[in-house]
Image: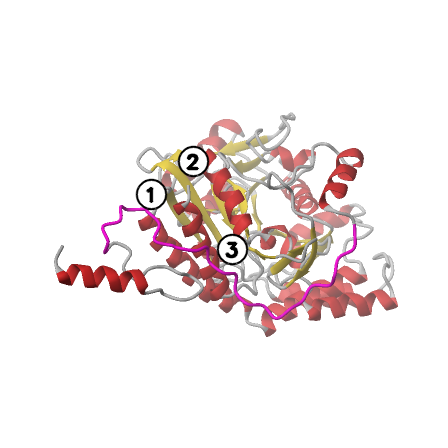
Amino acid sequence: MGLGKKLLIGRCARAFVSNRSRRWLCSGAAGLQRGESTAVNPPEIPAFDYQPKPYSGPSADEVLRKRQRFLGPSLFYYYKKPLNIVEGKMQYLFDENGRRYLDAFAGIVTVSCGHCHPDVLDAIVEQSKLLQHATTIYLHHAIADFAEALASKMPGNLKVVYFVNSGTEANELAMLMARLYTGNLNMIALRNAYHGGSSNTIALTALHTWKYPIPQGEIHHVLNPNPYRGVFGSDAKRYAEDVQDHIEHGTSGKVGGFIAETIQGVGGAVELAPGYLKMVYDIVHNAGGVCIADEVQTGFGRTGSHYWGFETQGVIPDIVTMAKGIGNGLPLGAVVTTPEIASVMSQKIQFNTFGGNPVCSAGGLAVLNVIDKEKRQQHCAEVGSHMIERLRDLQQKHDIIGDVRGRGLMVGVELVSDRKQKTPAKAETAVLFETLRELGVLVGKGGLHGNVFRIKPPMCFTKEDGDFLVDALDYAISKL
C-alpha cells in the first residue's frame, strides 16, 4: 500500500462528522463494501433541558398484567417488552426509569404541537376550572371561536364546521353527508386505505388483514395510486381510469362520494400519484358525487409545503375530515363542508353530546394559535426536507432501503430484501424496530406488509432530532 493511501485511510479513521452522528467523513476510503457500517459507537440522543418527575407508580409488568386481565384482548402493543411510558415533554417521552426516547411517531397518534405544550395545557386547565361540559343546546363562546378559527384555515366555500370526538366519527359523518346530499349510497375508496374503526369506516378499508371482514354494502375499492408499488407506477391517468370504470360498470353511472387520504398513513406514508385527485374529483363530480378529503394525519401544516394535504394535489374537496393533531391529544375531530351540503343535515336533528365541548374547543383553538405563532408549517418544511435528504443519502448506502417518501414531517421508509423485486423485508424490519427502541428512537410501522417505518413526530421536532434518527437507523442497519 502506498504512503498516500495509508495517510488517507488514517485521516478518515480519525475524522467524525460530529460527536453525535459519528459518521466517518470518508466511508469508502478503506475499501468498505456498500452498506457496511463505518459507525463505531451508537449515536447519542440530543441534549434536552428537562428533568422528568420521579415515578412511583406500578411497573411495566404490573400494568401489563392488569391490562391483559381487564382490557380487550384485541388491543396490541409495540415491542417484545412493551414500554411503560409515564411522562412526555415536547418531542420526547420518558419511561418508568426516567429514560428519554425521541418520539418520532406521536404525530400519527395525536400530537401536533408537542407533548404537554404549555400554551395548550394552560387553555385546557383554565377552561376546566370554569366549565368542563355544556351541550350545544346552550351557547358557549369556545365552540364558536374555534369553529370560526378553523373555517378561516379552509379554502373555497368550506365554511361550515361540525365537531365530533374522533377521526372515525368524522368519517362516519362525512359518509352520511355524502349519501344524504347526493341520494346515492355508492361510496368509492382506495385500496390500502384506513379511515377508522367503526362498521362503516371499516368497510372503506379494503384490507381485511387490518380490519374485520364485515359486509361492505355499497362500497367500491379502486386501485391504489402508489408510485412505488402501484401497478401503473406514477401514471395518475391510468389509476383515474380505474375509478371511471368502477362508476360506469359497478355503480350504474352514479356515485355518492369518493374518499381518500392525501398521504396514506397506516398504508405506509404513501403519497398519491401526482395529479390523481384532480382527475378523480372531476370524474366523481360528473357522476353526481361529492369528494371527501381525509386529513386526519396530513392536516395543519404537517406536509410543510401546504396547510392541508389535499392542497398538494391542487384540489378543493367538498367535505374535509380531521382529527388527531387537531387537539394535540384531546378526543377531538371535525368535519368541514360547504353550506349547500350542510343544509341537508338540517332536515333532521344532528347532535353530538361531547362534540365541541368547551374544554376540547379551548384546547383546539390553542393548537391553531401555537401552529401559527411558532410557524410550524415552515418548520415542518425545513426540518422535513433536511431529514428526507439525509434518509435518501442513507438509501444510497444501504440496499435494504427500497424507498424514502413523504413531505414535511410525514415520512415513510420502506425496507426490502431485494430492490429489483421490491420484496418486503418483514423480518429485518422487526429487528430494526426493536434496535431503534434500544437506541432511544420510537417510530411506527405500517404498509400492507408491515415493512414501512412511519415517521411522523411532533411538529416541534428539530433538525438535530432528525440527524439522531437517521444516524440511529444507519447504526441499526449496520448491525443487522
Could you tell me residue 383's position as x and y percent? 46, 64
Label 2 and label 1: CA atoms lie apart by 11 Å
Could you tell me residue 319's position as x and y percent? 60, 51
Instruction: Determine the image quadrant of residue 229.
Output: top left
Instruction: Determine if residue 185 is in view.
Output: no
Instruction: Determine the image quadrant of residue 22.
Output: bottom left
Q: Are dots 3 and 1 in contact, CB under 8 Å?
A: no
Q: Nearer the viewer, mark 2 or mark 3?
A: 2
Could you tell me residue 279's position as x and y percent? 43, 46
For image coordinates 58% across by 72% down, the residue present is 374
Chain part drawn in magenta: 29-57
For marks 3 and 1, the one nearer the N-term is 3
For marks 2 and 1, the one nearer the N-term is 1
Give the tally of numbered discs.
3
Q: Nearer the viewer, mark 3 or mark 1?
A: 1
Q: Amino acid at mark 3?
A: Gly
Q: Secondary structure at mark 3?
A: helix
Locate residue 228 relative to residue 369 in the image: left or right: left
Residue 399: assigned label: 1
Q: Amino acid at mark 2?
A: Ala
Using the image as rendered, state which of residue 350 and residue 109 is in the foreground: 109
Q: Amino acid at mark 1?
A: Asp
Residue 309: assigned label: 3
Q: Secondary structure at mark 1?
A: loop
Instruction: Determine if residue 296 is in view.
Output: yes
Residue 91 vertical placement versus 394 (above, below): below
What secondary structure characterizes most of the magenta part?
A: loop
For image coordinates 60% across by 41% down, the residue present is 79
Quadrant of the drawing holding the N terminus: bottom left
Please give the residue where the numbered disc 2 appears in the rendered image.
Answer: 425
Crowdedness of circle 1 by 10 Å Cα count: few (<14), some, many (20+)?
some
Label 2 and label 3: CA atoms lie apart by 29 Å
